[in-house]
Amino acid sequence: MAEYNQHFEKALDFINIYQKLVDCHLVDFITEGLWDKCLPERLRSELECIIDTSDDIWTENDTDSELSNFIQLTRSLSLESCPAVTWVDDLTKLLPQSSEGGSIENKLDVRPKSELMNTKKSHEIQVLGKVIAEMALITRSLVIDAGAGKAYLSTYLSEHFNIPVLAIDSSQVCHKGAISRQEKIQKRKRPLTKVRYIVQELDDMTNYNKMFHAVII
């Protein structure tokens, strides 16, 4: 965890230095002269030299280059460069071993059907859902989907992995949207009996155990 914190403290320091550049809008960058206001002088001068010459004078391995140092620094602060980050495919190495073995792997080898979901959302649910399902199945846990929205993830976990899910959202609009979506799906297939929906705001004092038993029992 210390390694993780150190990496993101460096990233936050970097963002603070270039906050004006991060926040600027493309149109404002042109109309408000943000080229001169947001870019450090040395980096700006080097970029202007590249623009003014017909030859590509910059190389990535140029250690004296302000641009090269800037690019290498941003790469070192990316999420992929953080040594404390675990890739999805390596997650199973950190989880306790299940006595079911291959049966869980077979359950995880599914793809969500794009029912009332666009392609982007379907991909997100597939990736995140597989991670959560693996953790829930191995530890034999139920899932609390806080900030569930229209409960895309909750529905996916219940339908494909038979995992009990409590979907919570503070928005009445999202709650109605989730119920409406579930009803449309159930017209085509079996009921989603392991998903329960609640409209409630969450805080540090929220009693999830009491909440779950109130809607299940």
Image (cartoon, rainbow, N blue to C red):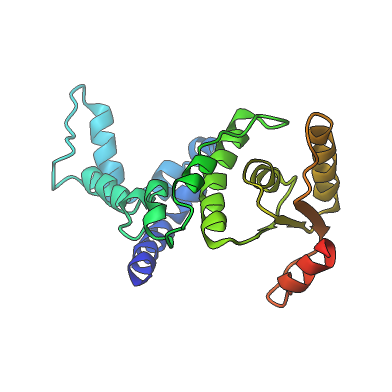
**Relative to the observer, which residue lies in front, 30 or 217?**
217
Left or right of residue 182: residue 118: left
**Relative to the observer, which residue lies in front, 141 or 99?**
99
Q: Residue 165: where, in percent of width, then height?
A: 70, 55
Residue sitting at 63 percent across and 41 percent down?
A: 160
Left or right of residue 187: residue 65: left
Total tally of numbered discs in the picture: 0
**Relative to the observer, which residue lies in front, 100 or 93?**
100
Q: Residue 27: where, in percent of width, then height?
A: 55, 35
Left or right of residue 43: residue 207: right
Q: Residue 57: where, in percent of width, then height?
A: 16, 31
Residue sitting at 30 percent across and 47 percent down?
A: 75
Q: Residue furthest front?
A: 99
**Relative to the observer, which residue lies in front, 19 or 212?**
212
Residue sitting at 68 percent across and 47 percent down?
A: 158
Residue sitting at 41 percent across and 53 percent down?
A: 91
Which quadrant: the C terminus?
Answer: bottom right
Residue 118 higher or lower than 157, as above or below? above
Left or right of residue 183: residue 166: left
Q: Residue 108: where, in percent of width, then height?
A: 52, 42
- Quadrant hosting residue 164: bottom right
